[in-house]
Amino acid sequence: MSYVHGYSVREGRRLGDQADTLADLLHAGIAYPAGSRVLEVGCGVGAQTVHLLARSPGVRLVAVDVSAASLAAARATVTAAYPGEDVTFCRADLHRLPYPDGAFDHVFACFVLEHLPDPRSALAALRRVLRPGGTLTVVEGDHGSAFFHPDSAYARAAIDCQVRLQAAAGGDARIGRRLHPLLTAAGYAEVDVTPRAVYVDADRPGLVDGFTRNTFIAMVAAVGADALAAGLTTPDDWRRGIAHLHRTTWADGTFHYTFFTARAVRP
Ligand SMILES: C[S@@+](CC[C@H](N)C(=O)[O-])C[C@H]1O[C@@H](n2cnc3c(N)ncnc32)[C@H](O)[C@@H]1O
């Protein structure tokens, strides 16, 4: 599978920083009753799984990913943090899940749809394993929502390199704005999308580090070699773009990004 972020140790650490920094924002309102059957697809290294369990103790959780290495890391992290919880890890493609129709009460997917060439068919595959009345929650970003001070055409061009590489790999880094129509077209009911904005300035030092530097700039910077190889930028422009993104973390800089959380029901 072509996957724009890759599976390096550094990317695993970035996913952890991202999940920990944004947990209160992205997991607000997501709590499943003890005993309910919950499926997390695209669990990666378990960065969101630990936050799911923190808010929903006692669920019967199945965590699925296509990457065996990520699943091994997820198993180590999650069982160390929550040894008493009922969690099963399974290597599978979310389009072909090895579970019967209606097997789960709730499905959760964070930062997964953005990497799939046909998110609508993925959503339909997830609907199959939900019981009628069960809920799907998806969390996605939208790189079109990134704006910052000081503004910089070089910084915007660097972000655009990531958007274009992700598109070339079949994904959509601006999928947040499409969640409502996608879920509706995939046959879900009661679709409810909430934008969740991250705003960073010097009075929020935890977000300057945890979000602007370690989540967002780290994600863009990681595609530099691929962007150069694809001829999307030059070494000078790339260096300026990343430097100008870092410039937004100075005392007089600001940064804004919006995530979208969608909740929908299987009719
Ligand atoms: C950006 S990571 C997000 C991981 C985790 N949800 C998080 O927020 O930290 C996307 C994950 O989706 C997984 N993935 C991509 N396509 C998949 C598929 N068809 N079936 C299952 N997992 C998939 C990737 O292997 C990767 O671990």
Image (cartoon, grey):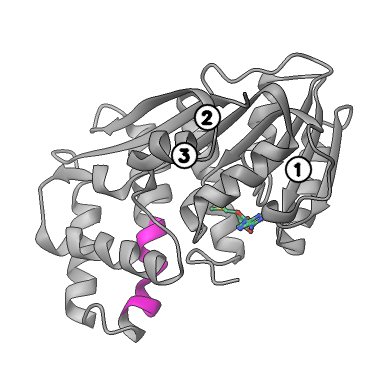
- Which image quarter holds the C terminus? top right
Q: Give the labeled residue for mark 2.
A: 23
Q: Is residue 157 visible?
A: yes
Q: Give the labeled residue for mark 1.
A: 63
Q: Is residue 249 visible?
A: no
Between marks 1 and 2 in the image, the one whose residue lies nearer the viewer: 1
Residue at 71% x, 23% y: name it.
132
Which amino acid does the dot numbered 1 rest on? Ala
**Which region of the structure is painted magenta?**
218-227
- Which image quarter holds the N terminus? bottom right
The correct choice, above or below, for 139 with respect to 224 in the image is above
Which amino acid does the dot numbered 3 rest on? Ala
Q: State the image coordinates of residue 19 (x, y, percent, origin top left).
A: 54, 39
Q: State the image coordinates of residue 233 (x, y, percent, origin top left).
A: 23, 78
Side of 73 relative to 226 (left or right): right
Side of 145 relative to 105 (left or right): left
* Type of secondary structure dominating the magenta stretch: helix
Side of 248 relative to 84 (left or right): left
Mark with earlier residue (1, 3): 1
SS at mark 1?
strand
Residue 185, numbered circle: 3
What distance separates the C-alpha of mark 1 from that of mark 3?
A: 26 Å
- Mark 2: give few (<14), some (14-19) or many (20+) Cα within 10 Å: some
Residue at 26% x, 27% y: name it.
203
